[in-house]
Amino acid sequence: MTPVEAAHTVIETITAMAQEQKPLMLRVVPKDKVHFWKHYPEKDARDKHCKSRWYYHVHAAGSRDEDEHGHFHLFLHRSQLPEGLEPKVWPPQGEDAKAHVTHLIGLSINTVGIPRSWFTVNRFVTNEFLFPAETMIEHLPDFNVDHTNQDDLVNRFVTAMVALYREEIADLLRQRDAKQAELEAEHGEKGYEKASGVEVLSQIPIDLDAKISGMDL
């Protein structure tokens, strides 16, 4: 998907959500009771063709920005990377880890359902198989969640957002690695774990109107 195609898809999906008067978060979480920290959907949204996946969750008040409703965590599956490629850092469970995924990026959503920021996280947050930024950047075009069993507009919106912001995500991944190198120098292997005390490694705000208006559509 080209950036222009992605921009059109983002516009189309957001417009459709607005016309249906059903914002993004209500397509993902239940109307009545949202459980903090729980994955929505419970076993993640998994693309049936390529195994890319997403889940959405909501942090408890006090542990999230005031204007954030919740955020997506987006992943590539290890099978989308070259066979035999060794992770830079393994989960403590090694090959027995429950999910064989590598975290691509986080996408924060505000209280009216509009994207507000991109961010990367330390390895322990998602218990990922951590691969270097340049590996992730090379495989950014492989991320696709158009074919999960969740809401079609949400699936297509998420896929398109990654394609639209590919350059910004690449920069964030490089910043992530630089911050992780600092933490490793200070804490050793614990720099990738909760003991480091650092969860978010890089972050940028999203101004979707400015991004799209600056493109030749």
Image (cartoon, rainbow, N blue to C red):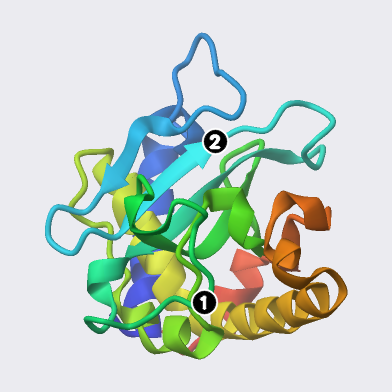
Taking depth in this image into account, of 105 and 112 the one nearest to the observer is 105
Of badges 1 and 2, the one in the foreground is 2
Taking depth in this image into account, of 28 and 101 the one nearest to the observer is 101
The amino acid sitting under disc 1 is Tyr
The structure residue drawn at horizontal position 48% and vertical position 59%, both measured from the top left corner, is 128
* Cβ atoms under marks 1 and 2 closer than 8 Å: no
**Percent position (x, y) of residue 17?**
40, 41
Image-based side of 55 in relation to 132, left or right = left
The structure residue drawn at horizontal position 74% and vertical position 82%, both measured from the top left corner, is 181
The structure residue drawn at horizontal position 67% and vertical position 66%, both measured from the top left corner, is 207
| Viewport quadrant of the C terminus | bottom left
The structure residue drawn at horizontal position 79% and vertical position 26%, both measured from the top left corner, is 61
**Percent position (x, y) of residue 118?**
63, 64
Residue 57's disc is 2
Q: To which quarter of the image does residue 209 belong?
A: bottom right
In the rendered image, the vertical position of residue 211 relative to residue 93, given as above or below = below
In what element is the residue under mark 1? Answer: loop
**Percent position (x, y) of residue 54?**
39, 50
Mark 1–mark 2 distance (CA, rounded to whole Å):
21 Å
In what element is the residue under mark 2? Answer: strand
Q: Is residue 115 visible?
A: no
Of labels 1 and 2, earlier in sequence is 2
Task: Tell me if mark 1 has few (under 14), some (14-19) or many (20+) residues whose alpha carbon lies within 10 angstroms of its own.
Answer: some
Residue to which mark 1 is pinned: 165
| Viewport quadrant of the N terminus | bottom left
